[in-house]
Amino acid sequence: MTSAKGKRRRVIFAGVVVGYVVATIIAIRQGYSLGKDAIVRCRRGHLFSTVWIPGASVKSVRLGFWRIQWCPVGRHVDLVHPVKTADLTPAERAFALSHHDALVP
């Protein structure tokens, strides 16, 4: 690998990392909870909690802000997306936190 190629790859890698950091900060400021107990909703409307780390996934396929993942409530595979905590009632939040998907695949 030439030094120009190596430098270009480092710049691209740094740009991707900065992009994920900025997107994570924006998502948190908009009210989305990320991390170990992130509350998500599938397309059928089921709420559950999962591990949501931007830029990383072990048990799902990332599609930008969406992921293809197992829904433990409806027992199906579907597109899921994070939900703003403020948009949930206390009962919905409690339900989602009591239904967590598997920690490892």
Image: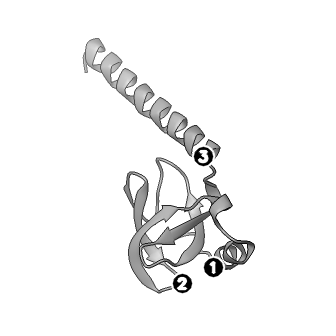
Going by the numbered disc 2, the residue's amino acid type is Val
Q: Residues within 10 Å of mark 2 (few under 14, many from 20)?
A: some
Residue 101 visible in image: no
**Residue drawn at point x = 44 percent, y = 26 percent:** 14
- The residue where tag 3 is placed is 30
Crowd class of label 1 (few under 14; some 14 to 19; many from 20; radius 10 Å): some
Q: Residue 52 appears at what percent x and percent y?
A: 55, 57
Which circle's residue, 3 or 2, is located before the other in the chain? 3
> Which one is earlier in the sequence, the residue at label 1 or at label 2?
2
Dots 3 and 1: beta carbons under 8 Å?
no
Q: Nearer the viewer, residue 62 or 7?
A: 62
In this figure, which residue is indicated by the disc labeled 1? 99
Q: How is the image coloured?
A: one colour
- For the residues bearing labels 1 and 2, Cβ distance under 8 angstroms: yes
Relative placement, left or right, of 68 versus 54 is left
Picture layout, residue 42 above or below residue 17: below
Estimate how packed mark 3 is, as few (under 14), some (14 to 19) or many (20 or more) residues with alpha carbons within 10 Å: few
Q: Secondary structure at mark 3?
A: loop
